[in-house]
Image (spheres, rainbow, N blue to C red):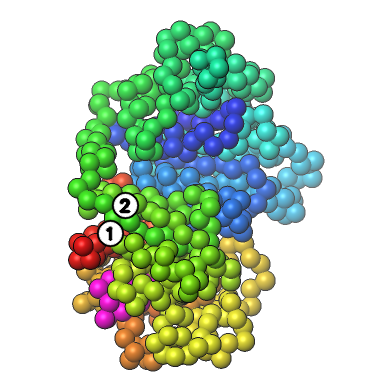
């Protein structure tokens, strides 16, 4: 049976539990262990699919069509192992299952309560991945902060699991904050003490304390935390702020966190972690040979996490090209014909981001017209691809009212239409075209040059599609459809034949990019941006 590591957080949110969990998973994987990571979120939404990106950042989609927390993106990028529906659980989905079971009479007339029914369902979800036999270690990140009312059922479940599984099969890593008071010139341990006390009050004693800090933690502070928090001094781990999230595994390696974990789980540690490829990646990341500026045009740019996978895909593609990619966020709502040149003229490439709704759409279309006419490398993702189709229809085919049904139901030229299977749906959650679908790529296309294959599979999240009633007019005018879904004939990729690099994709390539395998479309896009920069200079 798989062994379990729980990662909890204290003092404040946004300390980086997902990065710590991913980094720990990478170190254990580098030792030859089979690892997966799951996220338990305490909110009552069934999944993050209906949440505004301003509320929760991007919605990460798995191959099996699960709409999940963005931390699953970190798990995949670090481990290069696909996640699934089982890797993300919310309180909403837990309660939904329990209530459905109650309605079916599954509890034989018992009074349904948080203990044992909710906690038993949480335990079932925790163990589901471990029961597959595919993994040696399951890392479970508990969302929220210790002390939150919403997190109490998960902490209680953790208490029960530690008792049931035993101390050598289930351990707790608690991430906390060591604030630095500039006036006193010292790190303060009291918030950490209170956080651990709150966790202990609920019956859970952490085995390891990871301290997020801006300054190095002295031996004296480690011993103080160990004394007051009832852990061994070598189990107080420094997680100092890093220049890049990809530095964190090596920081934790220096702290011997992986070795401490193996000792506590009574696992053999004969094999030393092989981090050579990771170190090579970091070396290329920190020593680029060139630099490009790429504009990210979207309507959620105020929140960095709204486009997290896109941002990280540029990191991976930049490393592959030995290039530093400076991503310039540009709010589409504030782009107009008057200022578009000022905003885009110094860029080496432009990506128009996915999204929903009409806000900022005209700014995206204006930006696409600018880069199309000036031969600037362009990548449109999902709604970005749809905006490229609308722009082409309006300004090349001269259908001035061309639009998407999503934005204008009265348009006489709906070049983007609602998918047929979406038309009678009433529920919003989990009903889009979700997950991995096949795509046939045409040879002699930019997509084929990138993928080097005529058969690909990519992840989707959308309700609207290219309207095939207009297909012949677009092709005749120079917009080629170079990627088609073989089952539905859905247009997946469009390109312009008279442009050096202009690609729009209905799918989300950013969801497949990892440290060990940068996504080929992003790699090719960055390469095109480098060539454009050289040519214009």
Between 22 and 153, the one lying in front of the other is 22
The quadrant of the image that shows the N terminus is top left
Residue 65 position, x and y percent, is 49, 60
In the image shown, does 220 or 46 lie closer to the viewer?
220
The answer to whether one can see residue 137 in this image is: yes
Residue under the point 42% across and 9% down = 219
Question: For mark 2, what is the residue?
Answer: 325
Q: Is residue 432 left or right of residue 515?
A: right
Range of the magenta residues?
Answer: 493-504
Q: Label 2 neighbourhood size at 10 Å, few (<14), some (14-19), many (20+)?
A: many
Mark pair 2, 1: CA separation: 8 Å
Tag of residue 526: 1
The answer to whether residue 328 is left or right of residue 17 is left
Quarter of the image for the C terminus: give it.
Answer: bottom left
Residue 360, above or below 263? below
Dot 1: what SS? helix
Q: Are marks 2 and 1 in contact (CB under 8 Å)?
A: yes
Residue pictured at 33% horizontal, 49% vertical: 315
Whole-percent x, y for residue 500 in the image: 25, 73
């Amino acid at each position: 049976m798989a062994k379990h590591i729980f990662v909890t957080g204290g003092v404040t949110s946004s300390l980086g539990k997902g990065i710590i969990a991913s980094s720990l998973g990478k170190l254990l994987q580098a030792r030859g262990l089979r690892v997966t990571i799951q996220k338990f979120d305490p909110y009552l939404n069934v999944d993050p699919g209906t949440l505004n990106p301003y509320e929760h950042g991007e919605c990460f989609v798995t191959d099996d069509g699960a709409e999940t927390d963005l931390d699953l993106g970190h798990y995949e990028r670090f481990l290069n192992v696909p996640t699934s529906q089982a890797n993300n659980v919310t309180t909403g989905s837990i309660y939904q299952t329990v209530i459905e079971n109650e309605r079916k009479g599954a509890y034989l007339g018992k009074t349904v309560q948080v203990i044992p029914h909710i906690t038993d369902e949480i335990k079932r979800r925790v163990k589901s991945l471990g029961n597959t036999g595919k993994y040696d270690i399951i890392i479970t990140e508990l969302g929220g902060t210790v002390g939150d009312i919403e997190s109490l059922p998960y902490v209680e479940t953790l208490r029960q699991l530690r008792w049931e599984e035993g101390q050598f099969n289930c351990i707790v890593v608690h991430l906390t904050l060591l604030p630095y008071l500039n006036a006193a010139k010292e790190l303060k341990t009291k918030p950490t003490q209170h956080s651990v006390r709150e966790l202990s009050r609920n019956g859970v004693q952490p085995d390891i304390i990871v301290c997020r800090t801006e300054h190095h933690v002295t031996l004296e502070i480690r011993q103080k935390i160990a004394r007051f928090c009832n852990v061994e001094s070598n189990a107080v781990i420094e997680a100092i702020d890093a220049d890049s999230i990809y530095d964190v595994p090596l920081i934790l390696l220096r702290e011997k966190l992986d070795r401490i974990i193996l000792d506590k789980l009574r696992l053999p540690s004969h094999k030393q972690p092989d981090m050579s490829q990771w170190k090579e990646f970091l070396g290329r990341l920190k020593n680029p040979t060139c630099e490009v500026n790429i504009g990210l045009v979207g309507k959620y740019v105020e929140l960095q996490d709204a486009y997290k996978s896109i941002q990280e895909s540029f990191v991976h593609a930049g490393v592959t090209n030995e290039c530093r990619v400076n991503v310039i966020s540009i709010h589409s709502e504030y782009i107009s014909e008057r200022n578009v040149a000022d905003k885009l003229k110094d860029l080496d490439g432009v990506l128009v981001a996915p999204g929903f709704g009409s806000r900022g759409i005209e700014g995206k279309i204006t930006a696409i017209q600018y880069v199309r006419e000036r031969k600037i490398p362009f990548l449109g993702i999902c709604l970005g691809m749809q905006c490229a189709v609308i722009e082409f229809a309006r300004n090349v085919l001269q259908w001035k009212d061309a639009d998407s049904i999503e934005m204008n139901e009265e348009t006489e030229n709906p070049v983007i239409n609602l998918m047929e299977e979406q038309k009678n749906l009433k529920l919003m959650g989990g009903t889009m075209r979700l997950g991995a679908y096949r795509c046939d790529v045409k040879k002699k296309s930019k997509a084929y040059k990138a993928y080097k294959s005529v058969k690909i599979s990519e992840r989707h999240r959308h309700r609207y599609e290219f309207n095939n009633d207009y297909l012949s007019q677009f092709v005749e005018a120079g917009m080629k459809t170079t990627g088609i879904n073989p089952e539905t004939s859905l247009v997946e990729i469009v390109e312009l034949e008279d442009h050096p690099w202009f690609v729009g994709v209905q799918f989300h390539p950013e969801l497949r990019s990892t440290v060990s395998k940068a996504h080929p479309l992003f790699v090719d896009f960055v390469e095109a941006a480098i060539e454009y920069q050289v040519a214009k200079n």
